């Protein structure tokens, strides 16, 4: 496995990749030991920097997803939520062909998303518009949504 750290406005973000695909984005990059440079990591880091610079709306890097079939379907569905837009967990469940009662299961799957930002789970919010659980913390979720123009900055 290859690892690198990217300095971002939300702090150091760790990236983990095999020789062929990115497998993890880690919010606490300080806990990552950079090792084993690779073209995949270089491209992922470039795209992450471009995202934070406001120059990239959609990531285009090979991904390696380890999870159940249900989790992977939820994670891949995140990539269909356009930059600067949000959906509720119930809406994500509906888009997956599930009933609204699957919103909690979708939320649980999103909570295990190994590639936040790249697969934008921050774009999924509560049915009432509230910012709900996020692995990077709600302050980071708010920052990402404000960065994308999906939320007005707090005064």
Image (cartoon, helix red, strand yellow):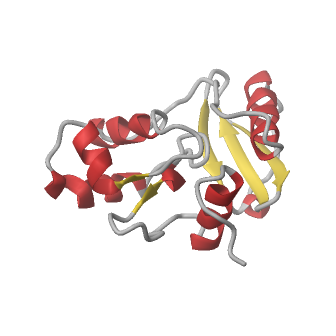
Residue for point 49% across, 35% down: 79
Report x, y in % for residue 96. Answer: 25, 37
Asked whether 141 or 27 is in front, the reply is 141
Report x, y in % for residue 149. Answer: 65, 52
Residue for point 54% across, 46% down: 120
Residue for point 17% across, 53% down: 100
- Which residue appears farthest toward the bottom when viewing the image? 155
Residue 12, picture quadrant: bottom right
Report x, y in % for residue 115. Answer: 56, 44
Compared to residue 101, the image places residue 34 above or below, namely above
Asked whether 59 or 94 is in front, the reply is 94
Residue for point 66% across, 49% down: 148
Q: Would you say 90 lies left or right of 16 here?
A: left
Asked whether 139 or 45 is in front, the reply is 139
Q: Would you say 58 lies left or right of 111 here?
A: right
Total numbered badges shown on the rendered structure: 0
Residue 38, picture quadrant: top right
Asked whether 60 or 153 is in front, the reply is 153
- Location of the C terminus by quadrant is bottom right
Report x, y in % for residue 109. Answer: 35, 52
Q: Would you say 109 lies left or right of 40 here?
A: left
Compared to residue 105, the image places residue 56 above or below, namely above
- Location of the N terminus by quadrant is top right
């Amino acid at each position: 496995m290859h690892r690198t750290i990217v300095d971002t406005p939300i702090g150091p973000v760790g990236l983990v990749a095999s020789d062929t695909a990115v497998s993890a984005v880690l919010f606490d990059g300080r806990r990552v030991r950079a090792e084993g440079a690779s073209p995949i990591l270089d491209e992922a880091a470039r795209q992450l920097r471009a995202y934070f610079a406001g120059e990239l709306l959609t990531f285009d890097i090979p991904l390696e997803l380890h999870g159940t079939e249900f989790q992977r379907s939820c994670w891949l569905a995140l990539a269909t939520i356009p930059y600067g837009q949000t959906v509720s967990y119930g809406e994500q469940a509906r888009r997956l062909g599930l009933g609204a009662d699957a919103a909690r299961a979708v939320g649980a799957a999103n909570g295990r998303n190994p590639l936040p930002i790249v697969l934008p789970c921050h774009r999924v919010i509560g049915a009432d518009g509230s910012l709900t659980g996020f692995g990077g913390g709600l302050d980071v979720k708010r920052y990402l949504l404000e960065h994308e123009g999906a939320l007005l900055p707090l005064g």
